[in-house]
Image (tube, helix red, strand yellow):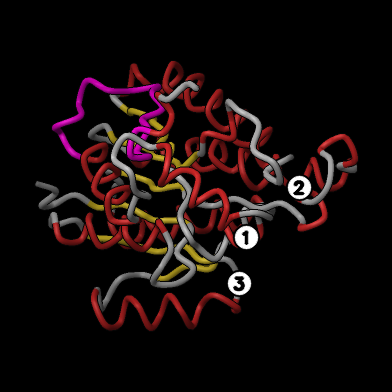
Amino acid sequence: MLKDKQGIIFGVANKRSIAWATAQALHEAGAKLAFAYQGERLKENVERLTAEEMPGSPLISCDVTKQEEVDETFKRAADEFGRLDFVIHSIAFAPREALEGEYLKVDRDGFLSALEVSAYSLTQMARAAAPLMTEGGSIVTMTFHGAEKVYQGYNVMGVAKAALESSVRYLAADLGARNIRVNAISAGPIQTLAARGVSGLSNMLKHHAERAPLKRNVEPREVGNTAMFLCSSLSSGITGETIYVDCGYNVMGI
């Protein structure tokens, strides 16, 4: 389905991350992948995962708070592939103290850090990727229902995800004329490294499983399969959307 397609994935942390499940789905569909990781701390994990399942995949260190590293990442991708067909944006960050207590108490630095890494980085990547998407392309990001509804302990990350979802719509409008589509996947809660920073995660998982129409939590691979669909020609008419992959939880009322 993605034979001869090539792209770059941001956000693989370990084998349980949504980005890695997405990489597996894209790889199995025939895509060639490059991986951008944040710093030496995560390099070893990404090297080990790709060596076992996707040997030869380019690995690039990229701190999205440094514009020169974002530019260099896409330059490297251009050198490796010539063009890009898709970008997977699966990164988010907020200081731990910004996820504790009341949102009212978040400080300026925590707010700006969360918005920069979790939301603005998508715009950075889209701007850098667009010139390489010479045959059109797909940009996919990951969001959460906390962008729309209040989740205790999600705090500033909910505000950042709301900005991310709005960015998806504006970027879709800007890039549509170039046949570049931009979409978000809103996954249900998943026990990832990043999610462990959210207080009350275990209660959230239990509540979702009880309330969701499918009576369970979503699996990372189900999110990855949806990302693969959004990167393929099967989704050629879809852009600017937030697609829920949460076992139906978001449709429930009382």
Is the residue marked by circle 3 packed among few (<14), some (14-19), or many (20+) residues within 10 Å? few
- The front one of 67 and 159 is 159
Residue named by callout 2: 113
Q: Which mark is residue 50?
A: none
Q: Is residue 237 magenta?
A: yes
Q: Position of residue 28 (x, y in %)?
A: 15, 60
Residue named by callout 3: 39
Q: Position of residue 65 (x, y in %)?
A: 69, 52
- Residue at left 35%, top 70%? 58
Give the quadrant of residue 48. Answer: bottom left
Residue named by callout 1: 63
Q: Is residue 96 left or right of residue 202?
A: right
Q: In the rendered structure, which amino acid carries the disc numbered 3? A: Gly
- The front one of 56 and 240 is 240
Q: Tell me the element at label 1.
A: loop
Q: Position of residue 253 (x, y in %)?
A: 47, 21
Q: In the rendered structure, which amino acid carries the disc numbered 2? A: Ser
Is the residue marked by circle 1 packed among few (<14), some (14-19), or many (20+) residues within 10 Å? some
Magenta residue span? 232-248
Q: Position of residue 175 (x, y in %)?
A: 40, 23
Q: CA distance from mark 3 to mark 1?
A: 7 Å
- Residue at left 51%, top 19%? 170
Cβ atoms under marks 3 and 1 closer than 8 Å: yes
Cβ atoms under marks 2 and 1 closer than 8 Å: no
Q: CA distance from mark 2 to mark 1?
A: 13 Å
